[in-house]
Amino acid sequence: MARRVFFSFHYQRDSWRVSQVRNSWLCRAGHEATPFLDGAQWEKIKRQGSRAIQNWIDRQMKGTSVTVVLIGQETANRPWVKYEIEQSAKLRKGIVGVRIHNLKNQLRQTDRPGPNPLDKIIVRRQTIWGGYQNVRVSQIANTYDYYLNNGRLNLSMWIEEAARNARR
């Protein structure tokens, strides 16, 4: 099934690694992802302020069924990544975390793993008994390592799993 996916990540630090993941996924038939901004476009939006960034993110998320959070060393500390995860949970999108620190950057260097941003976000979910409880997103969304878990081959499966779990 063709999926439209939103990729959430730390632009400045991880864009090279993210491009590897996104491009390998897009090469498979029927896949779509929200477009990436280049550095100049991102700076232009940033200069317009927080509201402009939020509006841009909201527009990019529209029509997507899954958010793939690409996790590098500093991703968990990024406020817009936090916003993207919160919005995805609020909109009941599928969410999957994918660690990318083992991929090489443009200097052919890997990175250290960072904390999982899905551990930091708490959402309210209905229990099977009809009540509600607060849970971390990491309790309802899986996280994989792109390099160690063969993401080139398995990313589509992880995305489909996230969509099924969210009933999308």
Image (spheres, rainbow, N blue to C red):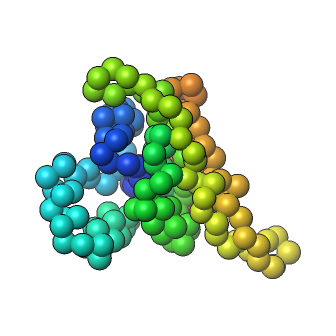
The answer to which quarter of the image holds residue 103 is top left
- Left or right of residue 80, residue 139 in this image: right
- Left or right of residue 23, residue 132 in this image: right
Q: Is 133 in front, or is 113?
A: 113
> How far across and down, in percent of the image, does residue 63 sit?
38, 65
> How far across and down, in percent of the image, does residue 140 sit?
68, 56
> How far across and down, in percent of the image, does residue 26 sit?
34, 39
Question: Can you see residue 84?
Answer: no
Say which residue appears at 50% left-offset and 31% top-offset.
Answer: 112
Q: Is 89 in front, or is 71?
A: 71
Say which residue appears at 57% left-offset and 45% top-offset.
Answer: 115
Q: Residue furthest bottom?
A: 131
Question: Can you see residue 71?
Answer: yes
Say which residue appears at 26% left-offset and 52% top-offset.
Answer: 35
Say which residue appears at 53% left-offset and 41% top-offset.
Answer: 114
Q: Is 139 in front, or is 61?
A: 139
The answer to which quarter of the image holds residue 83 is bottom left
Q: Residue furthest right?
A: 129
- Left or right of residue 162, residue 88 in this image: left
> How far across and down, in percent of the image, does residue 55 sit?
30, 73
Q: Is 51 in front, or is 8?
A: 51
Query: What is the count of numbered marks?
Result: 0
Q: Residue furthest top?
A: 108
The C terminus - image quarter: bottom right
